[in-house]
Amino acid sequence: MKDINNTGKYTDRDWEELAAHLSGERTGNSELLSRFAEEDKHNTVIYWKELREMNKEKEINVDQAWDKLYSRLKDNGLISEPAVRRRFFTPALYRVAAALLLLLGIGSALLYMNNKDLFGSKIVVATTEDQKNLEVTLPDGSIIFLNRNTQVTYSRNFGERERSVALTGEAWFDVARDESKPFTVDAGKAMVRVLGTSFNVRTSDQDSPVEVFVRTGQVMVTGTDENEVLVLDPGYIGTVYPDRAERSVNTDPNYLSWNTGLLVYDGQTLDIVFRDLKKVYNMDIVADDPEILSHTWTSPIDNQPQETIIRLICASFNLGYAKDGDVYHLKRK
């Protein structure tokens, strides 16, 4: 193996070795991989902000994606100079493209791994306070949408022997059916097991229960006590507490609004509306006069921009507003 030079740049041979490990062609420890992770933490934390717009398209332009990647590697001094542009795109690196395009496919999500897991067994995808509806497609074709402040972890070998993910936060799952390999979600205090269905899992802190809402198919939820088993049909919510598990019918039309962006109201007060807007649109709204919160709202809110939403509310109740940072302050005219 050719060593990395003192400037921190990588030779074509170095990239070939990294490619082989990233694509799974080689396994085991590697001095190059260790140095790759240790010398530049940006190699273990990749934030693809410049590809945000690409995430809106169903198909990813591979050439465009690689142009972006090549430019970033060059700007960061990770490609040795002089280098022939086309030599960078070797067969090994095209195999790595499949792994890296996972990052491109999830847009501006933060995908991170510690030094052990970067080239090991786990993939971790996490969203921040400013992100939601992050779409992750698993190797079996199952799709996960992550809400804000959510993290999902799964094996690089997902689907080979089992289909299992770990979740903290909230996520919507649309699971590809495979009766030979049930899909499981480890939600901390609860384990969710399905064959092929769509459902929502909500976890928060250790003191709060785990909630599972089923839209299609059937889901089995098991608490920490294996005697606590719920079988949920469409429209039902399973709530798992440390000491018990309960099943109930979902009566909240906005339960999945974080994912759909649609909020429906029929005479709810503005304090409830503002709470939902915080959860779904990350809007902070403060009423300078508490009586404003007693007004009732009956119109749907469906993926409108924040400024449009606040103007609709103000026009409906003859209110004015001022924005201080990220907070909207409502006042009577």
Image (tube, helix red, strand yellow):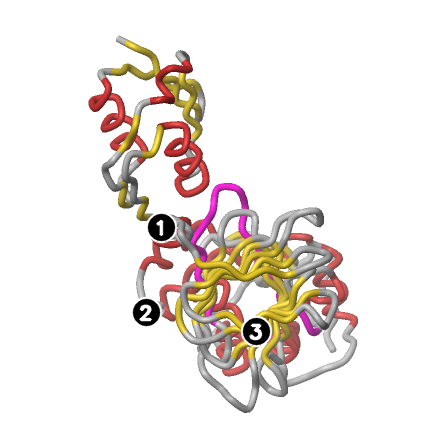
Q: On the picture, is 155 further left or further right than 288?
A: right
Magenta highlight range = 121-137
- Sequence order check, earlier mark of 2 and 3: 2
Q: Amino acid at mark 1?
A: Pro
Residue 192 placement (x, y as % from top left) = 59, 70
Residue under label 2, please give it: 59
The label on residue 253 is: 1
Local secondary structure at mark 2 = loop
Q: CA distance from mark 1 to mark 3?
A: 23 Å
Question: Where is residue 314 drawn, in percent x and y?
Answer: 26, 21
Q: Position of residue 293 (x, y in %)?
A: 38, 22
Secondary-structure class at tag 1: loop
Image coordinates for residue 82, horizontal then vertical, percent: 54, 63
Marks 2 and 1 sit apart, C-alpha to C-alpha, by 32 Å
Kind of residue sitting beneath label 3: Met
Sequence-first tag of 2 and 1: 2
Q: Is residue 188 left or right of residue 80?
A: right
Residue 1 found in image quarter: bottom right
Reply yes or no: does residue 126 show up in magenta.
yes
